[in-house]
């Protein structure tokens, strides 16, 4: 049972890393926020919260270094 939970968490993090790497913030907003109903917005943004955080972290680091 612990292995299954570990694999699910690992896949969840992998999906978030792929989305964070492949999409811009505008693309993420268009897909995950615009055109969604309230339940869809909440569900997708909870699922992709780490991707949003990685994007925010990347933008913060780039602006700090420049």
Image (cartoon, rainbow, N blue to C red):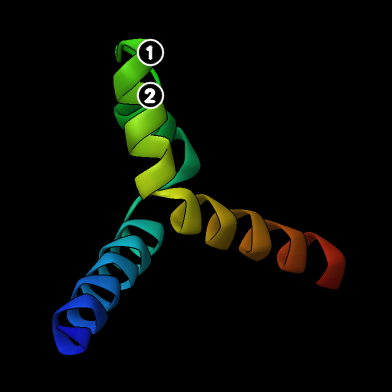
Q: Residue 53 vs residue 31: left or right?
A: right
The C terminus lies in quadrant:
bottom right
**Where residue 17 appears, x then y in whole percent?**
36, 68
Tag 2 secondary structure: helix
Q: Nearer the viewer, residue 27 or 50?
A: 50
Q: Residue at x 22, y 86 (%)?
A: 2
Question: Is residue 57 depicted above or below 36 in this figure?
Answer: below
How packed mark 1 is, by other alpha carbons closer than 10 Å (few <14, some 14-19, many 20 or more), is: few
Q: Residue at x 48, y 50 (%)?
A: 49
* Res 10 → quadrant: bottom left
Point out which mark residue 23 bears: none
Tell which of 58 and 41 is nearer to you. Answer: 41
Outermost residue on the bottom side: it is 3
Residue 37 image position (x, y, % from top left)? 31, 10
- Percent of width and height locating residue 3: 17, 89
- Residue with the mark numbered 1: 38
> How much space separates mark 1 and mark 2, taking CA atoms?
5 Å
Residue depicted at x 45% and y 56%: 51
From this view, report whether residue 14 is shown above or below residue 51.
Answer: below
Q: Quadrant of the N terminus?
A: bottom left
Tell me the quarter of the picture where residue 65 sits.
bottom right
Question: Neighbour class for label 2 at 10 Å: few (<14), some, many (≥20)?
Answer: some
Q: Element under label 1?
A: helix
Across and down, in percent, residue 40 comes to 29, 23
- Name the residue that disc number 2 marks: 41
Q: Residue at x 72, y 66 (%)?
A: 62
């Amino acid at each position: 049972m612990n292995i299954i939970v570990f694999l699910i968490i690992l896949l969840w993090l992998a999906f978030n890393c792929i989305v964070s790497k492949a999409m811009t913030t505008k693309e993420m907003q268009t897909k995950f926020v615009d055109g969604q109903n309230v339940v869809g917005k909440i569900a997708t943004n909870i699922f992709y919260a780490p991707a949003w955080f990685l994007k925010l972290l990347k933008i913060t680091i780039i602006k700090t270094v420049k």
